Image: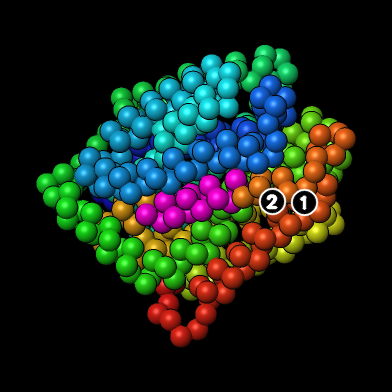
Amino acid sequence: MSTSVPLAFIAGRVLLPFACGYFMSYLFRSVNAVIAPSLQQDLNIGAADLGSLTAAYFIAFSLAQLPLGILLDRYGPRRVQAALLLFAALGAAIFALGTQFSHLFIGRTLIGLGVAGGLMSAMKTISLWLPAERWALANGVFMTAGGLGALCATLPVELLVQWLDWRAVFWILAAMVACASAAIFFLVPEKPGVQNAASEPIGEQLRSCGRILADRRFWRIAPVSMLGMSSSMAIQGLWSGPYLRDVGGLSRFEAAELQFALAAALTAGFTLVGMTADRLQRIGISLRITMCAATLIYAVDLLVLAAGWAPTHLLTWIVFGMLSNTTVLAYPILSAQFPAQLTGRVNTLLNGVVFGFAFFAQAGLGWIIGLWPRQANGGYPPEAYSWAFGIPLVTMLLGLLWYMAPGRDKVDK
């Protein structure tokens, strides 16, 4: 980072507009957890269709990651992110107008495509404007904007749905994401002295992606991040609401209140994890150790939810929110292993793997829950959620064991 560029300038003119885009990304990702009853009533769909509809976001998000990494390194994050967010605005408008499952699926897919660069464009920007030793802290603080988006997707959205309806909410979201696009394009400056990879042939950029995917360092850390974050996104982004209503016996409004607390903990967790990891690195404790320890605590909390021991206890959901995205530390861990000019591709390839699996996790939880018949009240029995939450728990622990296994080159910077 150039000493001639004040930190306040970087925060206000560079990171804040990107934070608005990431805020919208997480809001869109989480909003279906609250409006799910309305969608089920209006469209007459069950758990499997609801899971597939919501997961359409993730498959589009995932498929966009490979070209996104090339575009970020080639044209820079400002132009790429501003253009992508316009697709999200279009998708939100289609979702608001949709009267059939297929219409909403198309809208949700466009939303996923449009917000696919929310975090990766910011990570690319952070790598351009800040030194490597500050990336974990900057990423954690930046991701707080995502937590705020998840927060707004709970009780505030529920109140708006009660006051207006879910279609009006999506018209509002379409306008908000269009404003975020404009802010990024018109307010964010290009980094002085940085040459994007526009002169690098596309073929060479694609070959470099192949080399990254063939690198054993990538596949050492990808499984734990993929399995950990996918379970978090599937539950927080959709299935926490039905779980609280079906297992916890809460009303729709009571569930939204607890989801608000979950999202608040998620928001705080992004910042605290980044700050804690940054502080521990300074005293010699690596990001690798921090990520593994926090992931184990998250696994215990997920076990509590799967077993139904404390389905509505506030502390259970606070711990879930604060630690569920700990494996995001995999991004700075992996980025530090590759040259700076490859950070866009490295991060987006990892993100593609994570979000590709998140599609199967969110849809898969719906398929598992749908194996049980719906009860008289329209919900599903507790054992359906025990299996749906328990399977991701087991697979995440297997991914963690793979990462922690001795006898491999350590990736712990």
Residue type beneath disc 1: Ala
Q: Position of residue 68 (x, y in %)?
A: 32, 44
* Left or right of 348 in this view: 51: right
Query: What residue do we see at 49% from left, 20% from top?
Result: 94
In front of the other: 102 or 293? 102
Magenta segment boundaries in residue numbering: 349-363
Mark 1 and 2 residues: CB-CB less than 8 Å, in contact?
yes
Query: What residue do we see at 53% from left, 64% from top?
Result: 224
Can residue 43 be seen in the rendering of this structure? Answer: yes
Query: Which mark sits nearer the N-terminus, 1 or 2?
Result: 2
The answer to whether residue 6 is magenta is no
Residue labelled with disc 1: 384
Q: Secondary structure at mark 2?
A: helix
Residue labelled with disc 2: 368
**Marker disc for residue 75:** none
In front of the other: 376 or 25? 376
How many residues crowd around disc 2 within 10 Å: few (fewer than 14), some, or many (20 or more)? some
Q: Position of residue 312 (x, y in %)?
A: 82, 46
Residue type beneath disc 2: Ile
- In which quadrant of the rendered image does the C terminus lie? bottom left
Determine whether 139 is above or below 222 in the image. above
Determine whether 44 is above or below 29 in the image. above
Query: What residue do we see at 27% from left, 64% from top?
Result: 211
Q: How many marks?
A: 2
Q: Residue furthest bottom?
A: 407
| Cα gap from disc 1 to disc 2, whole angstroms | 7 Å
